[in-house]
Image (tube, rainbow, N blue to C red):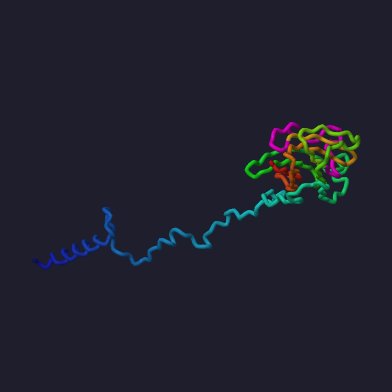
Amino acid sequence: MTPQRVPLLASLVVLLAAACTTTDHDGATSAPSTAPAPSATAASTPSPTAVPTTAPAPTSPAPTTGRPPAASDWRVTYGWAVPTAPARVSHAVRVPVTPAPGEPLPVLVDIRIGDHPSEGWTRVTFAFRGPTPGYQVALVDRVDSDGSGDPIDLPGNAYLSVRFDPAQGHLTSGRISFTAPARAVDLPTLRGWAPAGDFEGHLGFGLGLRTTGTPLPVRLGESTRPDGLHVVSVDVRRG
């Protein structure tokens, strides 16, 4: 080899070595670089200072307009017993409950009847707009109308008087304020119901019962419906 070819061969060796340190296009790993590579954690999780300032701030929950009713809302005010003497539950009601031209007393808006055979009783509920009025139930020989004193015609062979005060079952226009089911009830012990007066803040009803000779125990309770109405419930044993 002549002295003139040595520099040329040395240059070829240097070029080949430099080519071997570049990244291949077939997936082979290139020679390690001296620059620090970013870690996977740093790449997927931004630092706290990198959080955009335009991100929406957490919002507070909207205020509730009233407590939702739950099973615990219902409470017994008179346990299972036979009310041969009147059973009275008192509530202090400041009247008028709404200023004129609104109704001055708690207003009955709904009567419902529900049968619970697996639990052994039938329930009659009276729902009021405004505060819960006082109420009284009693087993009587007959139910008389408030004001006139006329006897109320009821089916069955035993009668339960249910009275509310102060309360009303009419609007300022004079129209009846409540909805109610049919008065005839085809259930084992509850046979029917009827209004028994709406006079000077006293609102009365009668329940017609069928017994086999033994007086039926009743139970009273109170609750609040989702719409805010205050409910008085009268439970009657099915037998």
Q: Nearer the viewer, residue 180 or 39?
A: 180
Question: Residue extending furthest front?
Answer: 213
Question: Is residue 115 found inside the magenta-colored segment of the image?
Answer: no
Location of residue 238 with respect to 78 vertically, above or below = above
Where, by quadrant of the figure, is residue 109 drawn? top right
- Left or right of 176 on screen, residue 71: left
Location of residue 113 with respect to 10 vertically, above or below = above
- Left or right of 78 on screen, residue 36: left
The image position of residue 35, as x and y in percent, is 36, 66
Where, by quadrant of the figure, is residue 171 drawn? top right
Question: Is residue 180 found inside the magenta-colored segment of the image?
Answer: yes
Q: Quadrant of the C terminus?
A: top right
Where, by quadrant of the figure, is residue 172 drawn? top right
The image position of residue 18, as x and y in percent, is 25, 62
Q: Nearer the viewer, residue 132 or 8?
A: 132
Question: Residue extending furthest left?
Answer: 1
Q: The magenta stretch spans which residues?
A: 163-190
Residue drawn at (22%, 63%), measured in percent from left and top?
17
The image position of residue 140, as x and y in percent, is 82, 41
